[in-house]
Amino acid sequence: MATADWDEVTYIRKKQPKASQLRSQQAINSAQRQGLTVETSKKYDGGHNRQVKGDKNTAKLDRETEELHHDTVSLDVSKLIQQARSEKKLTQKDLATKINEKAHLITEYENGKAIPNQQVLAKMERVLGMKLRGKDKGQPLGGPKK
């Protein structure tokens, strides 16, 4: 039988390098020299502890002295939408369903609080049969027949 010395320790394998050592530039260079495959990926906006990304123009807007606001639907357009919808005997929900939008959007347009969207206005014009944009607002859609 072989005798073993209990004070002597034999290591069979090398200690595995830590993850941070594997990602170092020196480890990447040595792996490339040996011909091993090196996979690198960068996280988008990684390493930051912020939830909202600030824009460069944010400070510029803060320095502005005048009041900034969005243009909303004019009152004459909102009244035209209400009148045309009531003439066609449609509810706000019915009109919203016909133009594939939410009923809340129709409410905002009729109250004059919505930011005008040309696509939504075009859909409403087709369903209501009345022009809501341009200089001839309130006129029937289609113009004179030839």
Image (cartoon, rainbow, N blue to C red):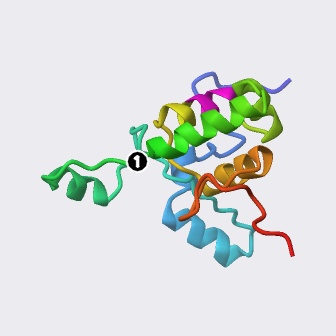
Q: Nearer the viewer, residue 2 or 76?
A: 76
Quick one: label 1, few (<14), some, or many (20+) residues within 10 Å? few
140, 17: nearer the viewer: 140
Instruction: Residue 9: tell me if it is visible.
Output: no
Residue in the picture at 60% in, 71% down = 30
Q: Quadrant of residue 100?
A: top right
94 in relation to 23, above or below: above
For the N terminus, the quadrant is top right
- Where in the figure is residue 69, as x and y percent of width and height? 32, 47
Magenta-tinted stretch: 103-107
Specify the amino acid type for callout 1: Lys
- For the question of whether residue 125 can be seen, the reply is yes
Q: Is residue 105 magenta?
A: yes
Residue at left 74%, top 75%?
A: 35
Residue 56 colored in magenta in the image: no
Residue 58 locus on image (x, y percent):
28, 53
Q: In the picture, residue 42 is in which quadrant?
A: bottom right
Judge whether 102 appears above or below 142 on screen: above
Q: Quadrant of the C terminus?
A: bottom right
Total marks in image? 1
- Location of residue 106 in the rendering, given as x and y in whole percent from the top left corner: 63, 33
Give left or right: position of 93 versus 14.
right
Vertical relation: 142 (above or below) 7: below
Secondary structure at numbered mark 1: loop
At 72% from the left and 41% from the top, the residue drawn is 12
Q: Which residue is mark 1?
A: 53
Q: From the viewer's perspective, is 63 left or right of 41?
A: left
Q: Locate residue 117, reporting x and y percent.
A: 58, 52
Q: Main secondary structure of the magenta part?
A: helix
Q: Which residue lies at the image location 49% right of the left edge and 48% below the top edge? A: 46
